[in-house]
Amino acid sequence: MSLEQLTVLSTACIVLSGASLLVGWWCIRARDDVTGHRNAMLAASGFAALFLVFYVTRWALHGSKPFGGTGWLRVVYFANLVPHVVLATVLAPLAARLIWLALAREDFVRHRRLARIALPIWLYVAASGWLVYWMLYRIDV
């Protein structure tokens, strides 16, 4: 696959992951739809896993792309990138724990408490990931 194809696929997956999160949140909060919530959250996790596969493949085949911007654009880029990477790293084990708690039906109180922390982090990671993509590949610098 080309660099462009892998980049678009990985970005689409992380955006779809964020959209699935919002659907899952809506299912459980507005409709009390546990099945819809579970399916949407599993879809979000699947899209996040696919993102990781495409991202690692792109990195292995094509390496990293340095940001070419200067001045305030460079500041904005790194101010977005650093928390994105840190929070994405924290999110992986957090999401795994949430999935375990839900699928094992072990402790829904703990699942709910942890989800209130994980949801905004995951949404931020999805949105900031799109911004990283846009700044690297869609703006002319």
Image: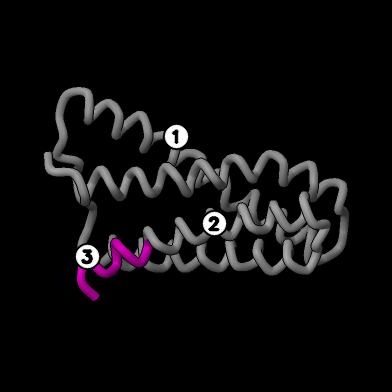
Residue 4 belongs to the span the image colors magenta = yes
Q: Residue at x 31, y 63 (%)?
A: 8
Quarter where residue 73 is shown: top left
* Dot in front, 1 or 3: 3
Mark seen at residue 83: 1
Measure the alpha-carbon separation of dots 3 and 2: 22 Å
Quadrant placement of the C terminus: top left
Picture coordinates of residue 126 (x, y %)? 47, 49
Picture coordinates of residue 80 (x, y %)? 37, 34
Measure the alpha-carbon separation of dots 1 and 3: 25 Å
Left or right: 111 with respect to 127?
right
* Residue 63 or residue 126, whichever sits in front: 126
Disc nearer the start of the sequence (3/2): 3
Q: Residue at x 40, y 47 (%)?
A: 129
- Name the residue at the left extreme: 141
Left or right: 138 with respect to 123?
left
Helix, strand or loop at label 2? It is helix
Picture coordinates of residue 30 (x, y %)? 77, 51
Kind of residue at disc 1: Pro
Helix, strand or loop at label 3? It is helix
**Mark 2 packing: few (<14 Cα in 10 Å), some, or many (20+)?**
some
Q: Which range is magenta?
A: 1-10
Q: Residue at x 20, y 63 (%)?
A: 62
Quadrant placement of the N terminus: bottom left
Mark seen at residue 4: 3
Disc nearer the start of the sequence (2/1): 2
**Prevalent SS, magenta region:** helix
Residue 25 belongs to the span the image colors magenta = no
Picture coordinates of residue 111 (x, y %)? 79, 50
What residue is shown with label 2?
19
